[in-house]
Image: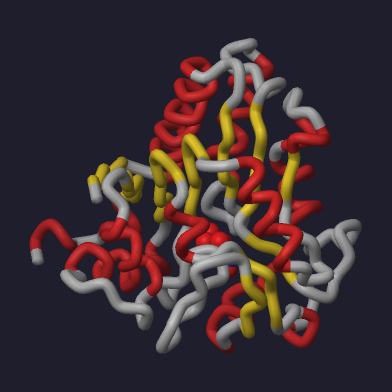
Amino acid sequence: MKWQVCKDYDSISQKAAELIRDTLIDNNIRSVIGFATGSTPIGTYRKLIEMYESKECDFSNMISVNLDEYIGISQDDAQSYYHFMHENLFDHINIQEENIHLPKPDGNTKDYNAVLDTVGRRNIQILGIGNNGHIAFNEPNEYLNARTSIIDLDESTIQANARFFEKEEDVPKQAISMGIGDILNADLIILLISGKKKQQATQRLYHEKKITTRFPASLLFAHPNVVVLVDEDAFGTIAND
Ligand code: GLP
């Protein structure tokens, strides 16, 4: 796991977008990129849109797969991750609609695993981290799923994601999420961490020496090529610990 501490949110977003741009250029016949939702990757998506507008980046041969989706809301719902990805990225670049893949809110895990198998290994997987160390929607537990599964969301995740909904009761209680084996099936994993709220999770990941399903981000230690782009707010005083 390589750590790159960047000054601020803008710098982590720029670096992540450049890594994606360079991969798209190197594999211009076909690239597979795994995208994430949450507020952290939004800056990266803005940079990619700017790169598209300035003709630095062409998405016509990019295949996208997303990590997860809420269960029980429709794709048209403003809170769905389908909607999020279109609003924050896909509607503003030249990706082909048939190359866009997200798990469906009906919770059909078999179909999504088949999509992942067809699409194959990703060139890059973008990830964020939950306050409790979750990746995608793989919550701390005594076991974690290898493949796409239905997840009961932790109370802390429901509370953290309530900011996007009118009322906390509106936050879905379940999600469909890629499993750990699916997440690791990428040549490069870019973990984006930003903001003071993520200091605790950042410190734990930085100091953790073991792989434990009680802290799902530690499963990333099993991957040989993970880059953590973290801003100073999230990194805090780790360097002086
Ligand atoms: C959700 C998503 C995760 C994301 C996490 C953190 O739970 N399923 O993929 O990493 O939120 O989101 P944020 O970047 O808003 O802190």
Residue 208, image quadrant: bottom left
Residue furthest top as drawn: 55
Q: Quadrant of the C terminus?
A: bottom left
- Seen as rendered, the residue at the extreme left is 240
Which one is nearer the viewer's eye here, 26 or 128? 26
Left or right: residue 177 versus residue 187 is right
103 w.r.t. 145: above or below: above
Tell me if 217 is positioned left or right of 203 in this view. right
Q: Residue at x 65, y 62 (%)?
A: 68
For the image, the number of numbered tags is 0
Up/down of 162 relative to 193, above or below: below
State the residue at coordinates (41%, 45%).
Answer: 190
Whole-percent x, y for residue 104 in the image:
79, 61
- Which image quadrant for residue 39? bottom right
Seen in the image, is 138 located left or right of residue 143? right
Residue 51: where, in percent of width, then height?
Answer: 59, 20
How did the renderer colour the structure? Answer: secondary structure
Position of 2 compared to 233: left or right?
left
Q: Residue at x 30, y 44 (%)?
A: 225
View quadrant of ligand 1: bottom right
The foreground one among 236 and 210 is 210
Identify the residue at image location x=31%, y=67%: 218
Q: Position of residue 153 (x, y in %)?
A: 61, 82
Image spot of residue 27 (x, y percent): 52, 19
Task: In the rendered view, tell whether residue 86 sits above or below residue 40.
Answer: above
